[in-house]
Image (tube, rainbow, N blue to C red):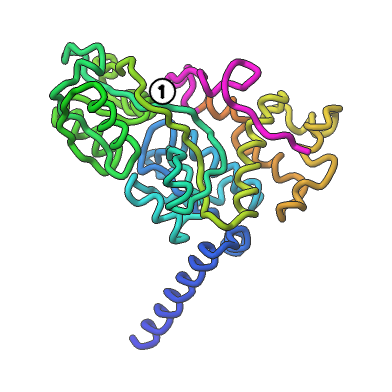
Amino acid sequence: MKKSVFFGSVTAVALAASGALAAEGDTLKEVKARGVLNCGVNTGLIGFAAPDASGNWSGFDVAFCKAVAAAVLGDATKVKYVPTTGQTRFTALSSGEVDLLARNSTWTFQRDTDLKLDFIGVNYYDGQGFMVRKDLGVSSAKELNGATICIQTGTTTELNLADYFKANNMDYQPVNIDSNAEGEQQYMAGACDAYTTDASGLAATRASFADPEHHIILPEIISKEPLGPAVRHGDNNWGDITRWTLYALIAAEEYGVTSANIDELAKSSNNPEVQRLLGTTDELGKMIGLDAEWAKRAIKAGGNYGEIFAATIGEQTPIGLARGLNAQWTQGGLMYAMPFR
């Protein structure tokens, strides 16, 4: 018994030290030593991050976790998915429990400064909306005066909701929930007239219903929600690795690099940007502590940004989201990558 307690104590100390190392600014070293990327994700949001019956995770945010693991560890499967709620996500990141947060999180002033998080970029431009049952007979959010509304605590949606109703001289009764799963349950049980969150999250939630055609997403978008992955403040190299992995996925779509043609383009492309992106010229990987083909592996893991979008949340999926603001900048959207030079 004493021996078990001793080794248990040693293990606990080792784990604590490991988390402290990551929290203090050497995440790349910690991830490589562990051999697994700890990625904070949603507790379950179809299309973005959700496990299947066998515990296999998939989705838009999951694809980014895989891309980072492929870039850093050479294997997109070397990911431990850590489910987080709106209330636990930032603590999980700041404490070192996760190395990367890829969980429908809005980049805000307070989170960037007061919480000491570094958002590495925007991977989805969104806005807050409302979902109601068709039989409620409501066609506009401005008809929700006096409604009960399900809302996740610890999110930007709480403040947005209060501001919107105040600005429109309306009242509402909040029904506080901790997760999207609870929100779905409460909404379906009739505990609230409307459910509010990011419009993409509403589309994902509705797609999971047995009768999605009986629910509508109202036309009003009441906020700006630039969603993006986040890392701890102060670990600049890890921030660079994750940031440029995101940019690699976006740039690959712009340059026509796909999971199908990437090997051929690595051999034959005459585009200097593509050559640098795929590691056939220059030594960009060395600048961030990785090898030459880090970005190539990240792209091969799930495809470029457009491929990931189409496969997980696009118009041909049950989620059915159009690219909209998330189209490439050359197509009238906001998605673009910094130059690889």
Q: Residue at x 43, y 52 (%)?
A: 114
Residue 328: quarter of image? top right
Give whichever of 98, 223 is nearer the camera. Answer: 223
Q: Position of residue 123 (x, y in %)?
A: 53, 33
Residue 161 in picture, x, y percent from top left: 27, 31
Magenta stretch contains residue 22: no
206 above or below 152? above
Residue matched to label 1: 319
Disc 1 marks a residue whose amino acid type is Ile
The residue at the far bottom in this view is: 2
Q: Quadrant of residue 141?
A: top left
In which quadrant is the C terminus drawn?
top right
Give the magenta-colored segment's residue range: 312-341
Q: Residue at x 71, y 27 (%)?
A: 257
State the predominant SS element of the stretch in magenta.
loop
Q: Position of residue 219 (x, y in %)?
A: 33, 15
Position in image of residue 238 (x %, y %): 61, 53
Residue at 48% across, 43% down: 102
Q: Looking at the image, how many numbered discs can be counted on the residues?
A: 1
Residue 320 is covered by the magenta coloring: yes
Nearer the observer, 200 or 233 = 233
How packed mark 1 is, by other alpha carbons closer than 10 Å (few <14, some 14-19, many 20 or more), is many
Name the quarter where the N terminus is drawn. Answer: bottom left
Secondary element under disc 1, as helix, strand or loop, is loop
Lateral position of residue 242 relative to residue 132, left or right: right
- In the shown orientation, is residue 271 left or right of residue 188? right
